[in-house]
Image: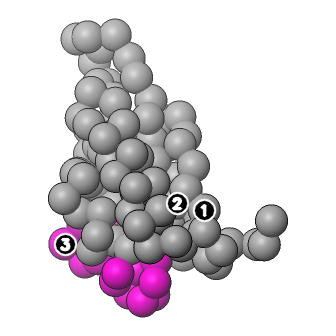
Amino acid sequence: MPKPQRHVFVCTQNRPPAHPRGSCAAKGSTAVLQALWAEQQKRQAYEGVSITYSGCIGPCDQGANVLVYPEGVLYRGVTPEDVADIFTSHLEGGQPVERLLAPASVW
Ligand code: FES
């Protein structure tokens, strides 16, 4: 397996209903993960991009959260409709999607 240029972590943490921290799963992160995998397949972007689900990465109230390395870019409030932009602008073009960036106070 070649070393990916970028590694995407999608928080799919789940918690019981009414848990005070909420969760990214409750905010639709599983659909985001599926959309990312589908977009990867559509673009056949298997060599440069790795996509992995993860547990909680911190700012649960901002979810669905997506973290991209090596830059350490945190996207918040991500929906499946944002996935094409993330691929085109960031994962392939190297430019983070400004409108989805978590504020500095979060990250
Ligand atoms: S549940 Fe996703 S960041 Fe905490």
Image check: 94 left or right of 26? right
Question: Can you see residue 25?
Answer: yes
Tell me the amino acid under the disc marked 3.
Arg
**Which residue shows up at 46% across the image and 64% down it?**
40
**Which residue shows up at 28% across the image and 18% down it?**
20
Image check: 28 left or right of 37? left
Q: Which mark is residue 8?
A: 2
Q: Earlier in the sequence, mark 1 or mark 3?
A: 1
Q: Which mark is residue 50?
A: 1
**Which image quarter holds the N terminus?**
bottom right
Instruction: Name the residue carrying label 3.
Output: 99
Q: Are marks 1 and 2 in contact (CB under 8 Å)?
A: yes
What predominant SS class does the magenta segment belong to?
Answer: loop
Q: Between marks 1 and 3, how big is the CA–CA gap?
A: 23 Å
Tell me the amino acid under the disc marked 2.
Val
Tell me the amino acid under the disc marked 1.
Ser
Element carrying mark 2: strand
Image check: 50 left or right of 77? right
Is the residue marked by circle 2 packed among few (<14), some (14-19), or many (20+) residues within 10 Å?
Answer: many
Q: Between marks 1 and 2, how big is the CA–CA gap?
A: 6 Å
Look at the image and say whether residue 87 sits in the magenta stretch: no
Is the residue marked by circle 1 packed among few (<14), some (14-19), or many (20+) residues within 10 Å?
Answer: some
Q: Earlier in the sequence, mark 3 or mark 2?
A: 2
User: Which stretch appears magenta?
Assistant: 88-107
**Residue 68 image position (x, y, % from top left):** 50, 65
Q: Nearer the viewer, residue 86 or 13?
A: 86
